[in-house]
Image (cartoon, rainbow, N blue to C red):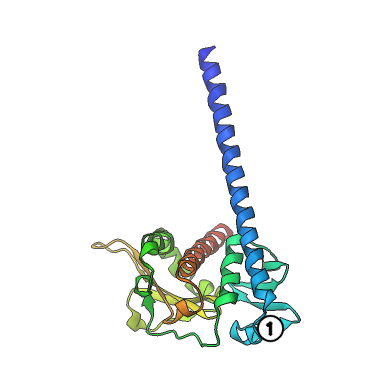
C-alpha cells in the first residue's frame, strides 16, 4: 500500500511539474508575442520612408516580404510570419528589432568579427559560446555532409580557405547580417570545435543581445535541418 501511494504521489508531482512548465512556456510565449506587437506598433507608427530599400524587402502597401532564417518572411502591422505560418515569437522579436534598427548601410562581410569583438558583448559571450558554437560540436561530421544544402537554405556562400578550419560557410539569417561558421573536425590530437564569426558591421543592424540570439537560433536551425535530413535518409 505504501509503495502504491508513493507511486501515485510521484505521478501527481510529475503531472504538476509538467503543467507548471507548460504554463511558464505559455506565459513566456504570450510575453514574447506582446513584445513583437509593441515593436511593430513602434515601426508602423512612423514607418521609415526607405524601409523597403534598407531591409531590403519587396513592399506591397504595408506588407514587407524578405528572407529571414531561411524562410520567406512577411512583416505586417498585425504580425510577422515565416514560411507563411506563425513562428516562435522570439524570431518575431529579432525580425522586428532588425526592421527597427536597419540602416541604409550595406553589409560589410570582412574582416569577419568574433562576437566578443563587438562593444558591450561581454555579458553575453558565455551564452553565445554555449548556444551558438558548442551546440554544433556533436554534429560537425553531419554538417559537413549537408553543408551545400545548409548554405543554400540560408542564401549563403562558401568561405575562402584563408578563414582556416577544415571547412566553412557563410549564412545570412537576416539580409544584412552574415554568420561565418568555421568547423574543425576531430582528430587523434584534438576534439571537434566550431567558431562563429559575424559580418564586420553586423552591430549596426541589431543590438548586441539580438546578435547573440541570431547566432543561437541560426545554429538551432542548422541542427533541425541535419536531423530532418538524417530522418529522411
Q: In percent of the image, x 64 and y 54: which residue is there?
A: 30
Residue 156 visible in the displayed image = yes
Expressed as whole percent of the image width and height from the top left, the position of residue 202 reads: 46, 78
Expressed as whole percent of the image width and height from the top left, the position of residue 72 reads: 65, 73
Furthest toward the top, the residue is 1
Left or right: where 109 falls relative to 28: left
Against 66, residue 88 (above or below) is: above
Expressed as whole percent of the image width and height from the top left, the position of residue 69 reads: 57, 70
Viewer-nearest residue: 152 or 7? 7
Helix, strand, or loop for circle 1? strand
Q: In percent of the image, x 58 and y 33: which residue is there?
A: 16
Viewer-nearest residue: 121 or 9? 121
* Quadrant of the image containing the C terminus: bottom right
Residue 88 visible in the displayed image = no
Viewer-nearest residue: 68 or 223? 68
Label 1: how many Cα within 10 Å (few below 14, some 14–19, many 20+)? some
- For disc 1, the marked residue is 58
Expressed as whole percent of the image width and height from the top left, the position of residue 138 reads: 40, 58
Image-quadrant location for residue 166: bottom left
Q: In percent of the image, x 61 and y 43: which residue is there?
A: 23
Number of marks present in the image shown:
1
Furthest toward the left, the residue is 189
Viewer-nearest residue: 62 or 88? 62
Left or right: where 148 falls relative to 84: left
Q: In percent of the image, x 60 and y 38: which residue is there?
A: 19
Image-quadrant location for residue 190: bottom left
* Quadrant of the image containing the N terminus: top right
Image-quadrant location for residue 136: bottom left
Amino acid at each position: 500500500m505504501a509503495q502504491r501511494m508513493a507511486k501515485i504521489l510521484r505521478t501527481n508531482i510529475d503531472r504538476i511539474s509538467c503543467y507548471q512548465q507548460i504554463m511558464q512556456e505559455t506565459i513566456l510565449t504570450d510575453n514574447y508575442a506582446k513584445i513583437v506587437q509593441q515593436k511593430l506598433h513602434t515601426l508602423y507608427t512612423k514607418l521609415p520612408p526607405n524601409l523597403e530599400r534598407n531591409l531590403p524587402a519587396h513592399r506591397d502597401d504595408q506588407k514587407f516580404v524578405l528572407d529571414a532564417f531561411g524562410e520567406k518572411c512577411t512583416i505586417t502591422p498585425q504580425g510577422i510570419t515565416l514560411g507563411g505560418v506563425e513562428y516562435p515569437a522570439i524570431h518575431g522579436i529579432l525580425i522586428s528589432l532588425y526592421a527597427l534598427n536597419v540602416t541604409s548601410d550595406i553589409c560589410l562581410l570582412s574582416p569577419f568579427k568574433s562576437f566578443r569583438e563587438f562593444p558591450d558583448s561581454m555579458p553575453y559571450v558565455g551564452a553565445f559560446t554555449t548556444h551558438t558554437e558548442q551546440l554544433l560540436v556533436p554534429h560537425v561530421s553531419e554538417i559537413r555532409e549537408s553543408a551545400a544544402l545548409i548554405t543554400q537554405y540560408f542564401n549563403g556562400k562558401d568561405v575562402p580557405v584563408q578563414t582556416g578550419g577544415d571547412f566553412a560557410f557563410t549564412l545570412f539569417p537576416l539580409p544584412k547580417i552574415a554568420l561565418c561558421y568555421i568547423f574543425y573536425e576531430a582528430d587523434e590530437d584534438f576534439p571537434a570545435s566550431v567558431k562563429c564569426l559575424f559580418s564586420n558591421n553586423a552591430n549596426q543592424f541589431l543590438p548586441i543581445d539580438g546578435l547573440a540570439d541570431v547566432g543561437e537560433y541560426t545554429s538551432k536551425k542548422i541542427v533541425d535541418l541535419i536531423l530532418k535530413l538524417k530522418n529522411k535518409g
